[in-house]
Amino acid sequence: QVQLVESGGGSVQAGGSLRLSCAASGDTFSSYRMAWFRQAPRKEREGVASIRSASTLYADSVKGRFTISKDNAKNTLYLQMNSLKPEDTAMYYCAAEAYGGTWPTLFVDEYTYWGQGTQVTVSS
């Protein structure tokens, strides 16, 4: 069982930055495939960024603005979000797959473990 706890959400103005963190349990964190997803009201959950080993994958809407990273020594996943836009407003979720494939993925069904979410609100 993997437990995930997100933090770092908040309210910022457009153009601002936030860094989300996701603390994970488990002895084999370094091998997890992990991702950040987000869900706005009345919209489906969408993948934002994923990481597996040294490989990363980003949604087109966040490329060049968001950076996903892992600190295996701290069992923590990060999402650095720069140049935030009002359309980035959503609940952000951390997801993990302990026995994932070789490559990162933004498909919701590929992940077994989910955090409780952290709210990000960007005002214009």
Image: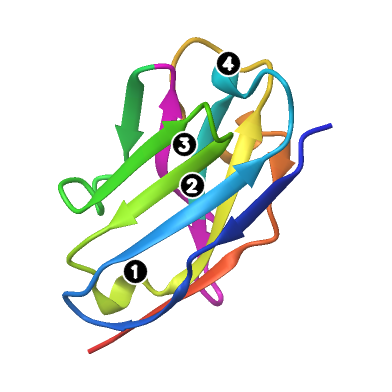
Q: Which residue is mark 2?
A: 36
Residue where numbered disc 3 is placed? 106
Query: Disc 4 and disc 1: Cα gap in Å?
Result: 29 Å
| Magenta-tinted stretch | 38-53
Q: Residue 28, relative to residue 36: is it above or below?
A: above
- The amino acid pointed to by label 2 is Trp
- Residue at the top extreme of this rendering: 102
Q: Of the two numbered discs 2 and 1 on the same chain, state the one appearing first in sequence.
A: 2
Q: Amino acid at mark 1?
A: Asp
Q: Which residue is mark 4?
A: 31
Circle 4 or circle 1, nearest the eye: 4
Report which quarter residue 61 is drawn in: bottom left
Provide the secondary structure element on which disc 2 rests: strand
Give whichever of discs 4 and 2 has the lower sequence position: 4
**Badge 4, how many Cα within 10 Å: few under 14, some, many 20+?**
some
Which residue is the site of mark 1?
88
Residue 98, quarter of the rendered image:
top right
Quarter of the picture containing the C terminus is bottom left
On whether residue 47 falls in the magenta region, the answer is: yes
Circle 1 — which element? helix
In this rendering, the answer to whether 89 lies above or below 108 is: below
Is residue 34 or residue 76 the one in the foreground?
76
